[in-house]
Image: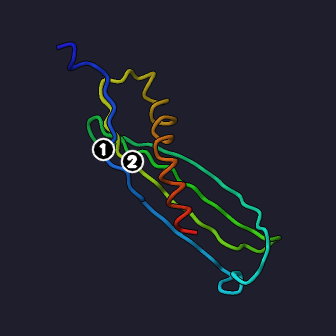
């Protein structure tokens, strides 16, 4: 009976939820030899959608600019479904806000890299 109450955490699925790429100055922008300034924003959210099942999503937005000109804008939402059972309430928020996004970051980085 004690084993049934043990905390458990499992990755069920990792997937790309949404992706977009805008290159407003194409094709001329590819001929310019400028070093762009990059702005990177990362945000995460989580939601319960079933008994012990949570979806955690991180959204990475990368904007590359040369002066006032936008070279590209890439955005990727990387998500995962995680099974979380018998985890104390005080440990649930750090798990969903820190541990799960940490698992998703390498996948999001690869998605953005492949996109641009």
Label 1 to label 2: alpha-carbon separation = 7 Å
Is label 1 in a helix, a strand or a loop?
strand
Is label 2 in a helix, a strand or a loop?
strand
Residue 111 — which label?
Answer: none
Question: Residue 2's spot in the image, x, y percent?
Answer: 21, 13
- Work out whether 116 lies above or below 12: below
Outermost residue toward the left in this view: 1
* Residue at (45% x, 62% y) in the render: 18
* Residue bearing mark 2: 80
- Work out whether 75 lies above or below 12: below
Residues tagged 1 and 2 counted as in contact (Cβ below 8 A): yes
> Toward which corner of the image does residue 16 lie, by quadrant?
bottom left
* Residue bearing mark 1: 12
Question: Residue 71's spot in the image, x, y percent?
Answer: 70, 74
> Toward which corner of the image does residue 17 lie, by quadrant?
bottom left
Sort mark 1 into few (<14), some (14-19) or many (20+) by Cα contacts within 10 Å: few
* Residue at (63% x, 77% y) in the render: 23
* Residue at (78% x, 77% y) in the render: 33
Of marks 1 and 2, which one's residue comes earlier in the chain? 1
Describe residue 45's horizontal placement relative to residue 27 as left or right: left
Picture quarter with the C terminus = bottom right
- Work out whether 111 lies above or below 3: below
Question: Residue 46's spot in the image, x, y percent?
Answer: 44, 43
């Amino acid at each position: 009976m004690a084993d049934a109450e043990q905390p458990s955490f499992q990755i069920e699925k990792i997937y790309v939820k949404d992706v977009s790429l805008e290159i407003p100055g194409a094709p001329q922008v590819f001929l310019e030899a400028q070093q762009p300034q990059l702005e990177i924003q990362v945000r995460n959210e989580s939601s319960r959608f079933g008994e012990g099942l949570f979806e955690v999503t991180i959204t990475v937005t990368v904007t590359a600019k040369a002066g006032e000109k936008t070279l590209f804008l890439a955005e990727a939402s990387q998500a995962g479904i995680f099974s979380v059972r018998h985890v104390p309430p005080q440990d649930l928020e750090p798990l969903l806000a820190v541990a799960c996004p940490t698992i998703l970051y390498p996948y999001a980085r690869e998605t953005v890299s492949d996109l641009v």
